[in-house]
Amino acid sequence: MTNNAAEAGQSRRPQAGAGRRLVLRYALLTAALFAPLLYAFATLRNLYPVAASTMMMGGWSLGRGRTYYVLRGETAEGVDVDLPFVSLVDAMHSRASGLVAATVENDSLTLFRPPHPSNAALVERYGGADKVPEAARVPDLLRALGGIYNSRLPAGSARRLRAVRLEEYRWEGGRYGDYDRLVRSWREEL
């Protein structure tokens, strides 16, 4: 038995040394992987809360202008109300604003092959897609959006719309100001 105890003591000593080497090896591996990450974090210009918010900002500069659209409605009482496009169509904001711009620029006439029959008839009537007046389908869009808004309200509600208006604004860029330059407007009775 003493022989077994001696062997057991001898075998424990190398295992204890192997365990320490293993811990040391993993500590060095962890440091080798963690050190570059720590360096990158320490040398960043923006720390966590700021970096997260700047990822959501637009990538455009002050030098470049921008066109944007505002959708408004006129209620049965004659009160003007803002109509958030996103709440009407339940879509993501960037896609929704792109839909309005595409409608104003007549993109629906050339994007799809074959075109919708009503679009094909419109193109044929004007003798080509490039000859169709700009914003030819905006009245249809405004009627559809007004219909969606009104469908969510009771028939006798004073908040129901009698007209929908789309306003196009242009910001020329260069400075933080002059956002409210109205370029043109479309109005559609419902």
Image (cartoon, grey):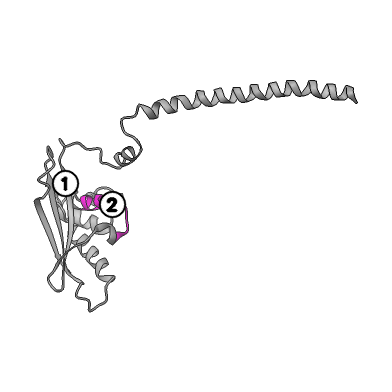
The front one of 1 and 176 is: 1
Query: CA–CA distance between discs 1 and 2?
Result: 15 Å
Q: Residue 151, how many percent across, how many down?
A: 28, 71
- Do the CB atoms of the residues marked 1 and 2 lie less than 8 Å apart? no
Q: Secondary structure at mark 2?
A: helix
Query: What's the residue type where badge 1 is placed?
Result: Thr
Q: Secondary structure at mark 1?
A: strand
Q: Say if the magenta span includes residue 93.
A: yes
Q: Quadrant of residue 148?
A: bottom left
Q: Quadrant of residue 185?
A: bottom left
Residue positioned 15% across, 53% down in the render: 126
Q: Residue 11, how many percent across, how many down?
A: 78, 22
- In which quadrant will I find the N terminus? top right
Residue 108: assigned label: none
According to the image, label 2 marks what residue?
93
Query: What's the residue type where badge 2 is placed?
Result: His
Residue positioned 13% across, 69% down in the render: 79
Residue 67: assigned label: 1
Do we see residue 162 in this rendering? yes
The front one of 71 and 20 is: 20
Q: Is residue 86 above or below residue 49?
A: below
The front one of 141 and 60 is: 60
Q: Residue 93, how many percent across, how many down?
A: 28, 52
Instruction: Give the mark nearer the N terminus: 1 vs 2.
Output: 1
Q: Which residues are magenta?
A: 89-103
